[in-house]
Image (cartoon, rainbow, N blue to C red):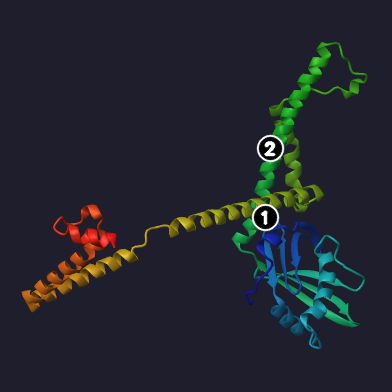
Amino acid sequence: MMEVSGAPVDVLLQRPWLPVSISGCRLLAKIWFGDSAYHILLTDMTCVWEERMDSAAIQSRAQELNRRLRAPVKAFFSHLCAVVQPCLSGGGERADDEAQISLTRQEDGDISMRLKSELAGLPFYWEFHCTPASVTLVCAQLVRPLLAMSRLLQRQVEQLGGLLVRKDAEIQDYRENGATLSRERLQTDVFEEQTYREDFMAKALPVASSKQQDAHGFDADLQHLYASVVAHGNARKRRLSEERCVEEEEQRPAASEEPDLTPSAGVGSVSTETAESDRGLSHNGQTEATRAKMADRAAVQQSLPVTCSPAERPASKPKKKKVGLFR
């Protein structure tokens, strides 16, 4: 099967797991349909299958299954969505009176869903070829959200237990102050968490183990909890990503303030050239070096009258400098 891109991870993650029944097989389905692409997940709590298709793959399969179909993907994809979505959203095996969908398990572990409907008065066929999903995808779409849901429900149970203890203390205070129940059937026993937990496990565990089909029941409350957990996780990821971007932005100016070693390299090159020129002078003889020194001294003497203050001028020529000042 050709490798194609499916829904963005966050978009597919926000889709709920919906219980469906196809050809007598109870499954949980998660679907995403874009403008001309789709990504579906199916699980029977033993394996998770997926199929993701883009526009080019959909066009190729549609022509293989419907020889006379020459329309572009957008011309028939809306019909495919309208027929398939009710079937994979808990709406039953038939989306309308004409559409039919069936599921077949392959020997290699894949599953195939065949759809038959009518498009513009002609039969329209489609097949979903679902292969086992990767462990990474299963963990992201099912395992981690379920673990987060279980932790959240556990905290809820703990808070409810603490609330019952406080309610018992409140009722006991009423009784000690003379309050009585108007109806004896409303009286309850004092809540003891350990006793309640042992009694609950003894009664509920055998029932849950004997009804495996209940594992596929994502009711409205669980779907809402799943959506809340996923939305909170996505918000946390975005917040961490924004904080990381801010840290990177703050580090960039600090990196630019580091001393630039290029000027020092230039100074080194200048000093190197000076040393080489000195070596050249030594090779050419002492005459040129002496002339250069005398020229430097002359330049310095000429510059003294301009840069020095009157107090610093030589005492040997006071009259000339005074005359110059009065002029």
**In whole angstroms, how far apart are the C-alphas of marks 2 and 1?**
20 Å
Q: Which three-letter amino acid code belongs to the residue tagged 1?
A: Leu
Establish if 81 lies above or below 150. below
Looking at the image, residue 94 sits to the left or right of residue 163; the answer is right
Location of the N terminus (image quadrant): bottom right
106 or 140: which is nearer to us? 140
Establish if 119 lies above or below 223. below
Location of the C terminus (image quadrant): bottom left
Q: Residues within 10 Å of mark 2 (few under 14, many from 20)?
A: few
Looking at the image, residue 272 sits to the left or right of residue 233; the answer is left
Q: Which numbered marker is on residue 155? A: 2
| Residue at screen point 70% across, 31% down | 198
Looking at the image, residue 69 sits to the left or right of residue 152; the answer is right
Element marked by disc 1: helix
Return the residue at label 1: 142
Element marked by disc 2: helix
Q: Position of residue 317 (x, y in %)?
A: 16, 59
| Residue at screen point 77% across, 68% down | 103
